[in-house]
């Protein structure tokens, strides 16, 4: 089953309110948000980060498409000692998705998700590439939190 099919299956099983959007393949926040009809800030940017001193090989840091991640804040929120962004090859191996299509939740169990608190507080709906560069999902932020149960912390720079 493809990552896109896994995402849609999960959202259906959990009775989430969402819509899918087909669009030209695009991984850049500015371009894809225009196609979705959402703001760049509403787009969930998902970054795979390695964090030393925790039990999992990586965490998924999620923040608005217009924000920059603060690695020190991500490491602190994960309870680790130090860390950094995972190389593209590792991120793709862990998620099964190309960079730009990584959704804001793990399709594999047991890996932590940390979401920027300002991102969740700012929008009723979030948008993201759903495991493919040519498919997006727009869903209620409330459903996202219910399904993913992420750690919520200030992880963006500035």
Image (cartoon, rainbow, N blue to C red):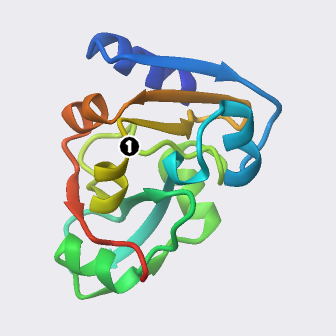
Q: In this view, does 110 lie to the left or right of 20?
A: left
Residue 83 makes an appearance in the image? no
Which residue is farthest right? 24
Number of marks in the rendered image? 1
Q: Is residue 51 above or below residue 92?
A: below
Q: Is residue 97 above or below residue 151?
A: above
Callout 1: helix, strand or loop?
Answer: loop
Residue placed at 34% from the left, 86% from the top? 72
Position in image of residue 105 (x %, y %) = 38, 43
Location of residue 125 by image quarter: top left
Name the side, left or right, on which 10 lies relative to 46: left
Q: Would you say 86 lies left or right of 13 here?
A: right
Residue 50 at what x, y percent from top left?
Answer: 40, 73
Q: Position of residue 27 (x, y in %)?
A: 72, 48
Residue placed at 43% from the left, 45% from the top? 104
In the rendered image, residue 137, in percent from the top left (x then y), is placed at 53, 28
On screen, residue 145 above or below 114: above
- Whether residue 13 is visible here, answered yes or no, is yes
- Of 133 and 117, nearer the camera is 117
Quarter of the picture holding the C terminus = bottom left
Q: Mark 1 points at which residue?
A: 123
Crowd band around label 1 with a 10 angstrom C-alpha radius: few (<14), some (14–19), many (20+): some
Residue 112 vertical placement versus 80 (above, below): above
For the point 19% across and 32% down, which residue is it? Answer: 146
Q: Which residue is drawn at 36% across and 20% down?
A: 10
Q: Nearer the viewer, residue 15 or 118?
A: 118
């Amino acid at each position: 089953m493809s990552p896109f099919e896994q995402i849609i299956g999960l959202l259906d099983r959990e009775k989430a309110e969402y819509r899918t959007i087909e669009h030209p393949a695009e991984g850049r926040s500015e371009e894809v948000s225009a196609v979705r009809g959402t703001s760049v800030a509403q787009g969930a940017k998902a970054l795979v980060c390695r964090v030393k001193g925790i039990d999992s090989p990586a965490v998924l840091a999620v923040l608005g498409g217009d924000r920059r991640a603060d690695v020190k804040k991500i490491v602190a929120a994960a309870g680790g000692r130090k860390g950094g962004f995972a190389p593209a090859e590792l991120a793709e191996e862990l998620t099964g998705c190309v960079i730009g299509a990584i959704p804001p939740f793990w399709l594999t169990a047991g890996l932590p998700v940390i979401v920027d608190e300002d991102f969740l507080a700012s929008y009723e709906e979030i948008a993201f590439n759903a495991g493919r560069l040519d498919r997006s999902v727009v869903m209620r932020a409330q459903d996202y939190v219910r399904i993913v149960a992420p750690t919520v912390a200030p992880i963006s720079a500035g």
